[in-house]
Image: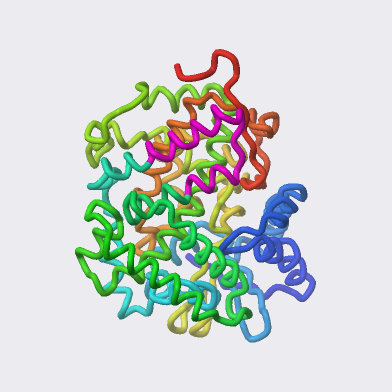
């Protein structure tokens, strides 16, 4: 049973703006700002946000909290039952195409699924599910995707061997080549200009409606995407989408690339924990115990064959639980909504602050611990407060594809036996509330800790 929302006082609203929303906006919702993510780690900003929201939840008996920003009304939910109602009720009556997201994502993906109107969504969602093979843990074209992973892993291994180190910038450059490879095929993996244009538009998107559009830059992005889509092999994501619907396919691609960026951040953080904890690293290595496997041998089956790498996937899910890449899940109501006896007008915004729910120490005994087993035994996946890939009918259609690609790269990099500079903070629980993935740096294998 939903409780009636409570209007925050002016003082409470100011505290929420300062401690919760301002740090999220400052870091960049669409593309991270390196100086601000470093600042957030130094301040451990997520810890302050959690403390405030927990205190407000106690003060207002678990009721949703109403924050007014001029004419805009935002409802911050504090109970997992309310999260469930929002996500199960998406895309109607609670649309993912919130006002803030439409303002931001229209800079580089105006036809993307996430901000589509209901009529367009009914066409675009099946296309995304077809291309991303949403229902299956192992994508139908897994051999092709794993070959792309092998190329990226080899590139990073050579870098470590040649320089003795690996920093976040080097990792992310290789990760982008991997993302282009999976999306368009190997011929596109060196299109640095596409990545640069997309990144520039995403920096504009950080400002949502406040930043003027740059249609000439978006037109360049669209031309490059369309050219790659036309040439993409059928085993690539873009090729699958093109073969299903050549008119709609190009408009969906920018969001896939955007989502890959967040997956790279999660892979870096999971690798950092594995590098600091020998038991985690060893278990990852044991899931892929040979040096090289033919892609055909990695195809597995949809129920979790060899390619599913369940522990690797669980490590990634745990990393994104601990350090969410989506700071807040946003929904807007499409019509007046009864909430605990109070009628909220159409257009009301709802906010799920991920870090608050994912580390709720009052509900989760493992709130600040690294416990990938919780994703293997069902404890985490059955909790509506834990939604690293959103959930419900509008949940991320690329969840399984991302976990497949990232787990194969994570497992291969774990075999390098790297050390991480922040190891003393990650080697034991509880873990820091905020970790700047852009500041992570790894060094060459410890003696005797190379490939087993």
* Drawn side of residue 232 relative to residue 257, left or right: left
Region of the chain picked out in magenta, as a range: 149-175
Q: Position of residue 210 (x, y in %)?
A: 63, 80
Name the residue at 35% across, 50% down: 182
438 left or right of 417? Answer: right
* Quarter of the picture holding the C terminus: top left
The residue sitting at 30% across, 64% down in the picture is 229
| Residue 225 visible in the shown view | yes
Using residue 354 as the reference point, say whether residue 109 is left or right of it: left
Q: Position of residue 200 (x, y in %)?
A: 56, 67
Which residue sits at x=64%, y=37%?
441
Residue at the far top: name it.
Answer: 448
Residue 173: in magenta span: yes
The residue nearer to you, when weighing 166 against 127, is: 166
**Is residue 90 visible to the viewer in this orientation of the structure?**
no
Tell which residue pokes out farthest to the right in this image.
Answer: 11
Task: Please tell me whether residue 52 belongs to the stretch shown in magenta.
Answer: no
The answer to which of 192 and 244 lies nearer the viewer is: 192
231 vs 337: above or below: above
Percent across and percent down for residue 60 are 67, 64
Q: How many marks?
A: 0
Q: Main secondary structure of the magenta part?
A: helix
């Amino acid at each position: 049973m939903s409780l009636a929302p409570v209007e925050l006082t002016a003082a409470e609203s100011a505290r929420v703006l300062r401690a919760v929303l301002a740090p999220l906006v400052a870091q960049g919702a669409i593309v991270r700002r390196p100086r601000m993510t470093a600042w957030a780690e130094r301040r451990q900003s997520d810890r302050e946000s959690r403390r405030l929201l927990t205190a407000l939840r106690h003060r207002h008996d678990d009721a949703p909290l109403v924050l007014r920003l001029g004419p805009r009304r935002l409802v911050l939910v504090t109970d997992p039952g309310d999260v469930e109602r929002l996500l199960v009720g998406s895309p109607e009556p609670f649309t993912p195409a919130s006002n803030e997201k439409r303002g931001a994502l229209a800079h580089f993906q105006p036809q993307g699924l996430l901000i589509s109107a209901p009529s367009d969504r009914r066409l675009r969602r099946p296309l995304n599910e077809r291309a991303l093979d949403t229902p299956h843990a192992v994508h139908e074209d897994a051999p092709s995707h794993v070959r792309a992973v092998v190329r990226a892993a080899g590139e990073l291994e050579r870098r470590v061997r040649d320089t003795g180190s690996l920093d976040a910038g080097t990792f992310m450059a290789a990760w982008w080549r991997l993302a282009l490879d999976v999306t368009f095929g190997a011929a596109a993996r060196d299109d640095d200009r596409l990545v640069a244009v997309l990144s520039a538009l995403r920096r504009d998107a950080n400002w949502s409606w406040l930043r003027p559009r740059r249609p000439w830059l978006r037109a360049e992005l669209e031309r490059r995407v369309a050219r790659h889509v036309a040439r993409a092999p059928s085993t690539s994501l873009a090729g699958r989408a093109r073969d299903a619907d050549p008119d709609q396919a190009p408009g969906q691609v920018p969001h896939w690339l955007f989502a890959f960026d967040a997956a790279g951040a999660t892979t870096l953080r999971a690798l950092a924990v594995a590098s600091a904890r020998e038991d985690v690293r060893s278990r990852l290595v044991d899931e892929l115990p040979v040096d090289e496997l033919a892609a055909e041998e990695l195809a597995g089956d949809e129920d979790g064959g060899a390619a599913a790498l369940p522990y690797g996937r669980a490590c990634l899910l745990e990393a994104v639980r601990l350090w969410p890449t989506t700071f807040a899940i946003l929904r807007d109501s499409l019509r007046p909504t009864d909430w605990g006896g109070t009628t909220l007008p159409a257009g009301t915004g709802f906010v799920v602050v991920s870090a608050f729910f994912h580390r709720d120490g009052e509900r989760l005994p493992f709130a600040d611990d690294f416990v990938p087993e919780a994703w293997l035994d069902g404890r985490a996946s059955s909790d509506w407060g834990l939604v690293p890939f959103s959930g419900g009918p509008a949940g991320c259609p690329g969840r399984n594809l991302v976990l497949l690609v990232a787990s194969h790269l994570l497992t291969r990099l774990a075999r390098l036996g790297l050390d991480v500079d922040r190891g003393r903070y990650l080697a034991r629980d509880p873990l820091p509330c905020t970790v700047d993935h852009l500041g992570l740096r790894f060094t060459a294998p410890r003696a005797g800790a190379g490939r087993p």
